[in-house]
Amino acid sequence: MACVGTSLALLAAYFATAGNELTQAVTFTAANLAAVVAILAEMRLNRPTCPGAWYPLAARQGAYLLGNVYWFVAAAPRAGPLREAGRRHARRRCLSVTE
């Protein structure tokens, strides 16, 4: 039941911070982390007889979490006003390599 409450609280926090992209990114990442923790905690508490399917599910959710962290830290700042500057830099690098 705590997992449902945490999920609802994170969902409400995400929509409550609609204008602040950084806060939304942190909230979204926290929700992804909560999903991984919930899967692993429920496996520990309930001890399923066949846990073989739960470990890959937790690993996939963890990979999704890492992808989101990468996006928010590395790739997202290049979007928006910085996108054109990044393209110019990439073109300069490509030209300097081919010359």
Image (cartoon, rainbow, N blue to C red):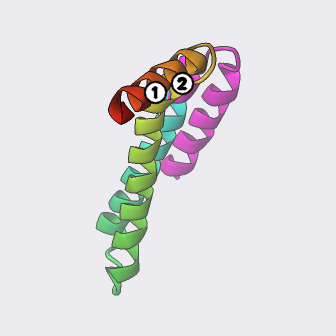
Question: Dot 1: few (<14), some (14–19), or many (≥20) neighbours within 10 Å?
Answer: few
Along the line of sight, the residue nearer the viewer: 24 or 45: 24
Q: Residue at x 50, y 21 (%)?
A: 86
Which stretch is magenta? Answer: 1-25
Relative image position of residue 69 (x, y in whole percent): 41, 37
Relative image position of residue 1 (x, y in whole percent): 53, 53
Q: Secondary structure at mark 1?
A: helix
Q: Residue furthest front?
A: 99
Q: Is residue 10 magenta?
A: yes
Q: Residue at x 34, y 33 (%)?
A: 97
- Relative vertical location of residue 16 with respect to residue 30 in this rendering, above or below: above
Q: Which residue is mark 2?
A: 87
Q: Which residue is mark 1?
A: 90
Q: Which quadrant would the C terminus be assigned to in this image?
A: top left
Along the line of sight, the residue nearer the viewer: 54 or 62: 62
Q: Is residue 35 magenta?
A: no
